Image (spheres, rainbow, N blue to C red):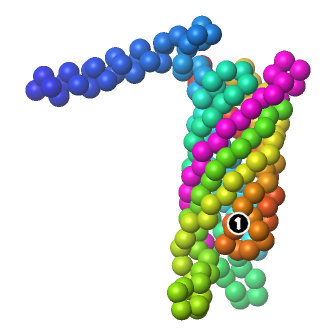
Amino acid sequence: MYKRILLPALLLLGSIHTSTAQTEFGETIKSRIYVGGNFGLGFGTFTNIDISPLAGYNFNKYLSAGLGASWMFYSYRFAGVSERASFYGGRAFGRIVPLPETFPGIFLHGEYETINNERWVENSLGAFEFKRTWTPAVHIGGGFRQMAGENSFFTFTVLWNLLDDGTQASSIYGGPLNYRVGFIVGLR
């Protein structure tokens, strides 16, 4: 009985201590964590829903890194033809703010992403099969973040997929250029 109560209590105390622990800059660790993501909606002949949450950590005023997940739904209806697909995956990213005093809104962004999607894949016999497979991407680029409150930002990012060679197997985005609009909120 005591073990059932003691272990959760110790974990709770440990998490409270961690969130209030001070960094070398005098801030709390919790104040360096941010959450947010990219969200997209489009309806009509071509329907697109994109939900891509993320969480990151500011190491200092220049560098942050984090992880994100993605879920995308596509639907196409035209002239009696209807297609639907659902994609999912994740990414690890890093961001650099090169001039935080002069241009605090400008950032450079790099990430590795892999998305599970449905596409035509060649099998060992040379025939094509429609099946689920993973598509990796290495995105580099930059963006701008605009303050939207004391500790929140709207973001606009333009990325180039280094692995896109123009084939269906190299990208899910229909080309190497990828635009993202999202937001970030700090946990202060």
Is residue 44 visible in the rendered image? The answer is: no
Q: Residue at x 56, y 66 (%)?
A: 134
Measured from the top left, where is residue 112 in percent x and y? 64, 50
In the image, which residues are magenta? Answer: 85-105
Q: Quadrant of the C terminus?
A: top right
Where residue 147 appears, as percent x and y from the top left, is 79, 27
Q: What amino acid type should be assigned to the residue bearing mark 1?
A: Ser
Q: Quadrant of residue 25?
A: top right
Q: Quadrant of residue 166?
A: bottom right
Mark 1, Cα crowd under 10 Å, few <14 / some 14-19 / many 20+, is: many
Direction from residue 62 to residue 8 in the image, left or right: left
41 shown above or below 172: above
Q: Residue at x 19, y 24 (%)?
A: 5
Q: Residue beneath label 1, please? A: 171
Compared to residue 77, the image places residue 136 above or below, namely above
In this rendered view, identify the residue nearer to me: 84 or 105. Answer: 105
On the question of residue 126 being in view, the answer is yes
Q: Which residue reaches farthest left?
A: 1
The residue shown at (59%, 80%) is 121
In the image as oriented, which residue stretches furthest toward the right?
102
118 with respect to 46 (left or right) = left
Q: Along the horizontal axis of the image, is 104 left or right of 60?
A: right
Residue at x 53%, y 10% (from the top left corner) = 22
Q: Quadrant of residue 67?
A: top right
Q: Check the image and report above or below for 168 versus 188.
A: below
Q: Quadrant of the N terminus?
A: top left
Residue 58 lies, in percent from the top left, at 64, 26
Q: Is residue 148 left or right of residue 72?
A: right
